[in-house]
Image (cartoon, rainbow, N blue to C red):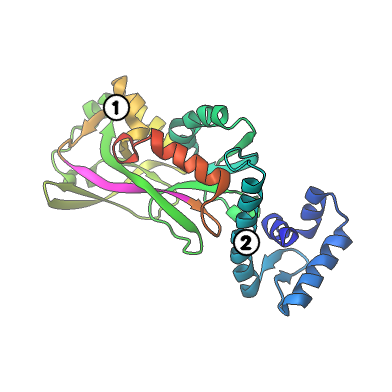
Amino acid sequence: MRLFVRVADAGSFSRAAIDLELGQPTVSRRIQDLEAILGSTLFQRTTRALSLTEAGQRFYRRAIDILAEYDEAEAEARGLEHEPVGLLRMSCAASMGRMLIGPQVPEFLDRFPHVRVDLMLDDTYTDLVGEGIDLAFRMGTLQDSSMMAKKLGEAPRALWASPNYLQRAGTPTHPKDLSEHLALTFRQVAHTEWKLTRNGETASASVDGRFKASSGEMLLQGAVAGLGILLGPNWLVREAASRDELVRVLPEWTGEPSPLHAVWSAGKLRGKAKLFVEHLESRVDFSTSC
């Protein structure tokens, strides 16, 4: 079962064989034996890729839980249930990693000296299974219903711009004015509509601009450089606002809050991943600090 999970995570018999220091024929044969025992095909094999079948996906989700339960039982029997060990692989957007997740890692490593952390900063949605990621942090509405998730909080969002841009382009007095301004938006979104609220009143504006990016931090730099107006979470703009590089636009209006989730591939949140999420929750109030 462990071998099956490792092959599924690696997406390759050869990579799993290298990781486990086994010969590839041995790995292939053991997977074939497992499939024979189960009476099901677990992997779809092609010359270019290895992917889980529907039966393989179901077995993978159950196997993750079974192995985690066994590991917890073994650790408890050995008196090590409070001493996690090994590698914790995590993924998040670059700006989130620098401003939210990364600052919490040193204390976590101090608390658990036998744990190692590998933090992947990626502004696209990382394939958790393919990359062997234990835990990812994602902003906004989740698209992949096959993933397990825990909502950590919601990040309040507001409109921000540099004093230089507002001096040059003028200051909006109502959300409808935003369509006449340059907006800083994510390149992944073909059409951007900002929805804002004020004391129960709702307004929206279709926006566009001359600068798009896949990174929140790049959009922040664009806002500081005077390239347009940014609708961003408070945690992203906090440092720039404290240096007066950005000022609030339409301060009585707020954007839709952006939810923040911890995401993992299957089973219950356990072990090192669970400990890190608990560590994060105890030190960051996402509903306000975000």
Circles 1 and 2, Cβ within 8 Å, touching? The answer is: no
Residue 12, given in percent of the width and then of the height, sits at 75, 58
In the image: residue 189, left or right of residue 64: left
Q: Which of 190 and 135 lies nearest the eye of the viewer?
A: 135
Question: Hey, which quadrant is residue 81 in on the image?
Answer: top right
Identify which residue is drawn at 27% across, 24% down: 164
The kind of residue tagged 1 is: Leu
Q: Residue at x 75, y 70 (%)?
A: 45
Above or below — where is 247 with respect to 206?
Answer: above
Q: Mark 2 points at which residue?
A: 66
Tell me where the magenta segment starts and ends, as one range: 253-262
**Cα distance between the residues tagged 1 and 2:** 51 Å
Q: Is the magenta stretch mostly helix, strand or loop?
A: strand
**174 sits to left or right of 168:** left
| Residue 107 located left or right of residue 238 | right
Q: Residue 180 at x, y = what percent?
A: 23, 44
In front here: 214 or 18? 18
Question: In which quadrant is the N terminus drawn?
Answer: bottom right
Left or right: 123 in relation to 58: left
Upstream in sequence: badge 1 or badge 2: 2
| Residue 44 in sight | yes
Q: Name the residue under label 1.
A: 246
- Residue at 72% x, 58% y is 2
